[in-house]
Amino acid sequence: MCMVIFAPLFAIFAFATCGGYSGGLRLSVDCVNKTESNLSIDIAFAYPFRLHQVTFEVPTCEGKEQEKLALIGDSSSSAEFFVTVAVFAFLYSLAATVVYIFFQNKYRENNRGPLIDFIITVVFSFLWLVGSSAWAKGLSDVKVATDPKEVLSLISACKQSSNKCMAVHSPVMSSLNTSVVFGFLNFILWAGNIWFVFKETGWHSSGQRYLSDPMEKHSSSYNQGRYNQDSYGSGAGYSQQASLGPSSDEFGQQSSGPASFTNPI
């Protein structure tokens, strides 16, 4: 039930916070010659974080010429993989929810449905772990590449002490941090669901039968031994009573002999 409720929601939060991100930073380059200064250099970037394609122009402080630079790095592969896993996990969660609610009888009709569900759950657990780990590393690279100090080090004018360079504002990464958190939460959710899906498969029921058979055999042999012991005890008592019976009768007949003999006297 937790899987049905939380899996689609966690998947939505994961790909929405990552795939819908757009941010930026603003720099300021104050040259000795104020006419060449640029106090508002905006650098915008967004998903899928192909930072090497993000270009911006800065003053050289050596004339009217502008220097064209680009950010460093490319985290598109890890980001796109993470979002792809999240989207397909969301779609499968919706399909599984529909099957669980409306087609429960067909789902339990044979072992094929639970077996397919079990395999897909294991696969998605592995994909969430790999995707979240890769995206966590990719996000770390994005943070380094978009750090204002790192970007200012690329500007040649900022290497001269006579010019003043500073960051007006830094990029906000809170939503990207949230995407990584939801990625690992999805892994925990899917990995925890493996056991519950496994219980629906024939492997679990056959394993239970295998474990219960030796116990049943041991119990039946124990009961059989008790039955034999009881039957032996009752038979021995019966035979003992039968052997003692005639001797008492004979003893009675012997004692009645003299009585019958002394009667006439």
Image (tube, helix red, strand yellow):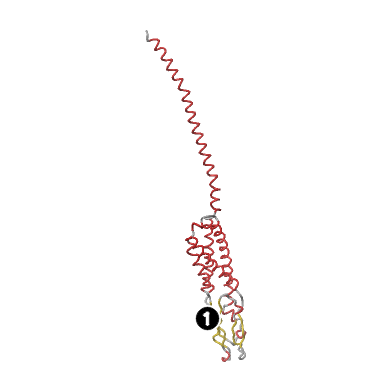
Task: Locate residue 191: give its quadrant.
Answer: bottom right
The quadrant of the image that shows the C terminus is: top left
What residue appears at the point 52 percent right and 81 percent down from the top-left corner?
A: 169
Q: Residues within 10 Å of mark 1 (few under 14, many from 20)?
A: few
Looking at the image, residue 264 sits to the left or right of residue 174; the answer is left
Query: Could you tell me residue 217's position as x and y percent?
Result: 54, 42
Query: Could you tell me residue 41's position as x and y percent?
Result: 56, 84
Does residue 70 appear in this view?
yes
Q: Which residue is mark 1?
A: 169
Nearer-the-camera pick, 96 or 242: 96
Farthest top residue in view: 265
Q: Is residue 20 above or below residue 243?
A: below
Total labels: the figure holds 1
Task: Locate residue 162: give its quadrant.
Answer: bottom right
Query: Could you tell me residue 227's position as x and y percent?
Result: 50, 35
Nearer-the-camera pick, 192 or 138: 192
Nearer-the-camera pick, 26 or 12: 12
Nearer-the-camera pick, 216 or 74: 216
- Which amino acid type is marked by label 1? His
Q: Is residue 164 above or below residue 260?
A: below
Query: Could you tell me residue 102's position as x and y percent?
Result: 47, 61
What residue appears at the point 53 percent right and 66 percent down from the top-left corner?
A: 91
Q: Is residue 150 above or below residue 185?
A: below
Secondary structure beneath label 1: strand
Task: Locate residue 139: give its quadrant.
Answer: bottom right
Does residue 199 appear in this view?
no
